[in-house]
Image (tube, grey):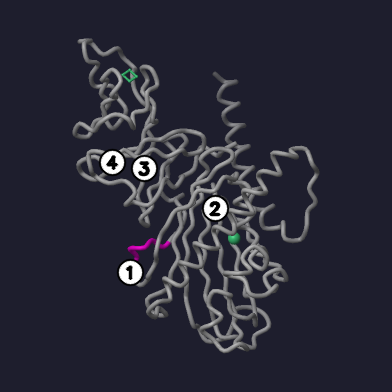
Amino acid sequence: MFLKNAWYCAGWDNDVGLGAGDLVVRRIAGRSILLYRKGNGEVVAMEDRCPHRSAPLSLGRKEGDDIRCMYHGMRFAPDGQCMEIPGMPRIPQGICVPTMPVVERNNWIWVWMGDPARADPDLICYAIGPDEPGWRLKTNHIRIETGYRQEIANLADLSHVSWVHGLTFGGSEDWSFIKPQHSMQPRGIETRYCVRNIPGPNFAKHLFPPDARFDIQVHVRLSVPCNFILSFAVHEAGDATSGPTNGKLLLDTFSSQAVTPRDEGSVDYYFSWGTSEDTYFPGIVDLMFNANAQAFLEDKRILEGQRERMLEYPDAPQVDIIHDAGPGRMLWVLDKLIEEEAREAAGVSEAA
Ligand code: FES
Ligand SMILES: [Fe+2]
């Protein structure tokens, strides 16, 4: 089940080029979407299905700003209207391909999958893109065979850092003892906390004396469908026992992560990570980014294993523990929005 009225990330802007062969297909919320750029650089998003006999338009060719289906040659404009049917002088009314609103922001391409009249760009999640001045960020993409609800549960509860990421981001069990307060937002949750006096993460331990201790100031913004925006600042361990750390800032890092459901059991995960220009030093972004790539494989392994067992035991009861609070709140927001849409759709069809 997917939220329709939401912006879904369709990838990094440089995934969709201007070349003749740059016809990119993304599976988004159960639909196949063709992305391409018009001559002026604007991205077009349309259903990747010819209305004649359902051939993928992504197997077609660009003709100016139009797309020609390469099965029987019908040609479609960027707004989806049929412009030509070879061998048929008159085009019957109403032949068109559904198109979707598109916005490029923070080097991401966002596609609105619901009612075009409601496509408000202000609903696009806050992020920092790799072109943002003052930051040194690297980007990548991974595919994970899991449901986006499982991704939400993974990202809304960072206690798993101690266990899943013991060889990379972890380094102690401290992440399991944090009880973050999540504030509810109209389309997600926001969480701020400090993890105090912990050893360095495994991937960077060799850079510091063995007894070095740090405070990690965490700020998470999680929004529908599954966008995870993380500010993660590493400080020297201070002596404050509540509120923000008072330790000296060592490394200010930022990660923008958009997890787009392809269907119920698969996600495309677009992410960046890096440091502020002010705290950057040579080699650090590559070190972080290589650790990140390894850590996401750690997530992939556990999430894909989890999905296998969930399919194997679909009716098995599950117990709840304290760390389910964040996931529970985020899934509550998502489900509420999905239910509102369903109620609205039912109201419209009753009235019709
Ligand atoms: S399937 Fe596209 S023109 Fe026939
Ligand atoms: Fe993780």
Question: How many numbered discs sit on the rendered protein?
Answer: 4
3 and 2 marks in contact (CB < 8 Å): no
Left or right placement of residue 299 versus residue 124 in this view: right
Residue nearest the viewer, comparing 346 with 239: 239
Name which residue type carries label 2: Ser
Q: How far apart are the alpha carbons under marks 4 and 3?
A: 17 Å
At 26% across and 26% down in the image, what residue appears?
A: 68
Q: Which mark is residue 223?
A: 2
Q: Is residue 307 above or below residue 203?
A: above
Q: Earlier in the sequence, mark 2 or mark 1?
A: 1
Name which residue type carries label 3: Val
Q: Residues within 10 Å of mark 1 (few under 14, many from 20)?
A: few
- Give the number of the mark in front: 4 or 3: 4
Q: How far apart are the alpha carbons under marks 1 and 4?
A: 28 Å
Residue nearest the viewer, comparing 228 with 52: 52
Q: Earlier in the sequence, mark 4 or mark 3?
A: 4
Q: Which residue is mark 4?
A: 22
Range shown magenta: 128-132
Q: Which mark is residue 102?
A: 3
> Which quadrant, please, contains the C terminus?
top right
Residue nearest the viewer, comparing 20 with 152: 20
